[in-house]
Amino acid sequence: MIIGHQKVLDYLQKSVAKDRVSHGYLFWGPEKIGKKKVAIDFAKTLQCQKSPHQSPEGEQVPYGAGKHGTGQAKNFCGVCKNCQDIEKGIHPDLILVQAQSPSREIEISQVRDLRKALSLSSYSGNYKIAIIDEAHNLNREAANALLKTLEEPRGKAVLILISAFPNSLPKTINSRLQQIKFSLVPTEIMKNYLKNADLDEKKQEEILKISQGRPGVLRDILDDLKKKDIYKSFIKSLLGLKNFDLNQRFDYVGKIAKNRKESIKFLQGLSIFFRDLFLIKLGVNDFVLNSFLEKELALAAEHYSKSQLQEIFKLLRRLNEMLSRSNVNPRLCLEVLMLEI
Ligand SMILES: [Zn+2]
């Protein structure tokens, strides 16, 4: 079930109906917004064994309207073998490529394997589809090899690159891809989806505030409502940070830094925290996300000037990008941060 992105879905569906599917797409836009989900559903649309219904006028009618008041309908059946195998991630004509640990880069060997897989004929006699997730992680050799694939498109092959940092991709690659932009999902659509979640209105509002138009965040919260309580205690621990001496601060981040993903999450949490402090400084408290802690946040805001907060934002953004895209030691990153905040 996709939340939002109706225009993108319509566009892709039309390209299938008119037999104008591109060889290469770039799905770009903020993280946690549903780009990969749309790519997977697009793969189902391309592979579904049951053709869409025909209306009396001969037009194609999609399968079932959306259940959650989002007004969406699917363009695949969801029950045939192709649809199910794609959902399970085991369809032989769908190749998923993503960065491998420990390098966190997409390596040339992966692109070579991909080229080989695309050169074989399709099992289903239909499209071969490759999804390259977080494509900004392609290293230079891998990007060059991928460029060759894009320069010599073969038959029914579709490459879908996904990225929240499209400018980090080589221009030569970008220019060969059809750009599909994903935007934050309007609150109204997120709200409609949440209506089915059996939560009181206040809770729904809080979740909407935290997810900020990102269905992936909303899903995460619904999957584990406890996260919100954890988040509260996280903010409370941040509020205490100011009273820690340097040793205590290093101890605090030392535990988080053992896990790179946790470190990135920590930085994202900090970004929201400092955003709140900045908004309080500006006197626009209505936009504060963690308004349930407004008093404590107001006290914390007194420790920083606006320009200090701006510098912290810059640092957080830089560290976040470094941690996401390079081998830099998380502990080092977080310790640098502890010296600055
Ligand atoms: Zn199907």
Image (cartoon, grey):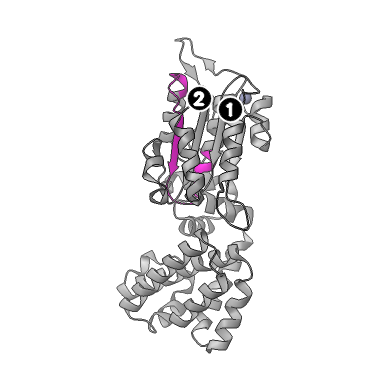
Q: Residue 154, labelled with which disc?
A: 2
Quadrant containing the N terminus is top right
Q: Give residue 102's position: percent from left, percent from top.
A: 62, 58
* Span highlighted in magenta in the image: 16-38
Q: Give residue 288's position: percent from left, percent from top.
A: 40, 67
Can you say whether 257 is above or below 72 in the image? below
Under mark 2, the amino acid is Arg
Can you say whether 260 is above or below 172 in the image? below
Q: Is residue 49 magenta?
A: no
Quadrant containing the C terminus is bottom left
Under mark 1, the amino acid is Ser
Q: Is the CB of the residue bearing disc 2 within 8 angstroms of ligand 1?
A: no
Describe residue 82's horizontal placement relative to residue 146 as left or right.
right
Residue 88: image quadrant is top right
Q: Are marks 1 and 2 in contact (CB under 8 Å)?
A: yes
Describe residue 183's horizontal placement relative to residue 211 as left or right.
left
Residue bearing mark 1:
119
Which residue does the image show at 47% across and 23% down from the upper left? 16
Describe residue 285's horizontal placement relative to residue 125 as left or right.
left
